[in-house]
Image (tube, rainbow, N blue to C red):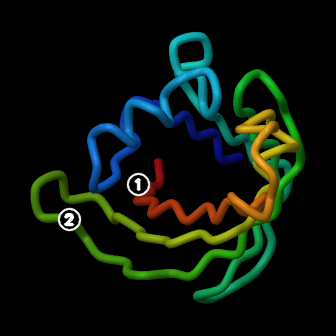
Amino acid sequence: MLDVSISLNSLQSSHPGREEHLQGEDFFHSGQFPTMTFRSTGIEGEGERWHVNGDLTLRGITRPVALDTNLTGRALFPLDQKEHIGFVATGVVSRTAFGVAPNIPSLMLSDDIKVEPSVQLIPE
C-alpha cells in the first residue's frame, strides 16, 4: 500500500503573487484544506514500469486516479545503508472534479491538471 500526504503550502511557482492566489479559496483553499492525499488501491507492473490506481483527495473531495510510473534509480544509500528506490509518476486529473477554480472556463484555464510527483521509497 502506498499512502502519500502533500502539504499544499509546498506548492512553488516562479511568481510569489501567483503562489498566494493558488493557495486561496478560488483554487486550492489551503487554509481549510492544507493537504492533498493519495492512497493506492492497486499496484501492478514489473521492472521499470508500474501502474498505480488510487484515491486522490483534494479540497475534501476524493476521486479515483491512475498514475503511470517509471523507475528512475535504485541504489544503496551510504548514510543509512538502506536501499532507496526512485520513481516518477505521471497522471492527469480534472481540476473541476476536485472543485479547483470551478468558475473559470476551460478556454481560459485547462481542466486538466498534470500530476507528476517524484517519489523515493525505502523498503522496510
Q: Quadrant of residue 111?
A: bottom right
Query: With respect to residue 11, does 24 lie above or below?
Result: above
Q: Quadrant of residue 91?
A: bottom right
Residue drawn at x 27%, y 40% is 16
Left or right of 64 on screen, residue 92? left
Compute the Cα span from label 2 to label 1.
10 Å
Residue drawn at x 64%, y 28% is 26
Q: Earlier in the sequence, mark 2 or mark 1?
A: 2
Q: Classify mark 1: residues with Cα within 10 Å, few (<14), some (14-19) or many (20+).
A: few
Residue drawn at x 51%, y 81% is 71
Secondary structure under the numbered disc 2 in the rendered image: strand
Percent position of residue 67, x then y: 73, 67
- Give the residue type that dot 2 points to: Phe
Residue situated in front as seen by the camera: 41 or 84: 41
Secondary structure under the numbered disc 1 in the rendered image: loop
Residue drawn at x 42%, y 68% is 85
Percent position of residue 102, x then y: 81, 38
Residue situated in front as seen by the camera: 88 or 19: 19
User: Which mark is on residue 77?
Assistant: 2
Mark 1 — residue?
122
Q: Classify mark 2: residues with Cα within 10 Å, few (<14), some (14-19) or many (20+).
A: few
Q: Quadrant of residue 11?
A: top left
- Give the residue type that dot 1 points to: Ile
Left or right of 116 on screen, residue 3? right
